Image (cartoon, rainbow, N blue to C red):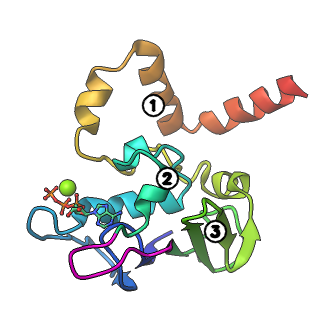
Amino acid sequence: MPLKQLILNGFKSFADKTTINFDTGITGIVGPNGSGKSNITEAIRWVMGEGSAKSLRGENMKDVIFAGSEFRAPLNRAEVSLIFDNQDKQLNFDNKQVAVTRRILRSGDSEYLINNQQVRLKDIRDLFVDSGLSQDSLAIISQGKVDQILNSRPEDRRGIFEEAAGVLHFKQQKEVALRQ
Ligand code: ATP
Ligand code: MG
């Protein structure tokens, strides 16, 4: 399930539409301090359903929208798309290519799309569950995360192992069944 492309538009420091192509093999993103490297990994987490503004270094989810600079007015919307090659059907979706999009307006309205069709956040979670790429999986290790794991409570650490072992999906299904 290779990642093919990331498109940022109005997300944090990426005021202009920016397309990042991921070739086969390893992609490294380098740049000076403050150039936007962490913003790129945050964009990936955001489009996959990150719900915590704080973990994206903001106070409010609207803080992901380009806030303006000395030479440029703030924007009113942010949009990020992540495009996967799904020929191996690792994502729970029939199409060979899956484009996941999230957008947010300054009014607070936000929406998710899969291949240009509007969907619920739950559909995004279902798409990634068991792919090893869910929003809080260890596929993305951000700055400070290693310390956080080492210092976490045993029950939280257990959650990390459950995710890695692929049992989280069944646990979530059980919780839903018990609530019904
Ligand atoms: P480092 O090497 O220090 O980790 P980095 O390349 O990871 O740096 P980021 O943290 O991704 O850099 O980028 C920070 C920059 O993004 C800052 O200049 C900050 O002002 C800018 N930024 C963050 N949010 C917004 C926003 N909503 N609008 C405009 N710029 C923003
Ligand atoms: Mg950084």
Q: Quarter of the image containing the C terminus?
A: top right
The disc at residue 61 is 2
Rendered position, 5 above or below 160: below
Residue position marked by numbered label 1 in the rendering = 160
Q: Quadrant of residue 97?
A: bottom right
In this picture, which residue range is highlighted in magenta?
68-78
Rendered position, 55 above or below 86: above
Picture quadrant of ligand 2: bottom left
Q: Quadrant of residue 152?
A: top left
- Per the image, label 3 sits on a secondary structure element best described as loop
Is 142 contained in the magenta span? no
Is 71 contained in the magenta span? yes
46 or 61: nearer the eye? 61
- Per the image, label 2 sits on a secondary structure element best described as helix
The residue positioned 67% from the left and 72% from the top of the image is 114
Kindly report the secondary structure that dominates the magenta region of the rendered protein. Answer: loop
Three-letter code, disc 3? Lys
The residue positioned 41% from the left and 70% from the top of the image is 11
Report, in whole angstroms, how far the alpha carbon at label 3 lies from the one at label 2: 32 Å
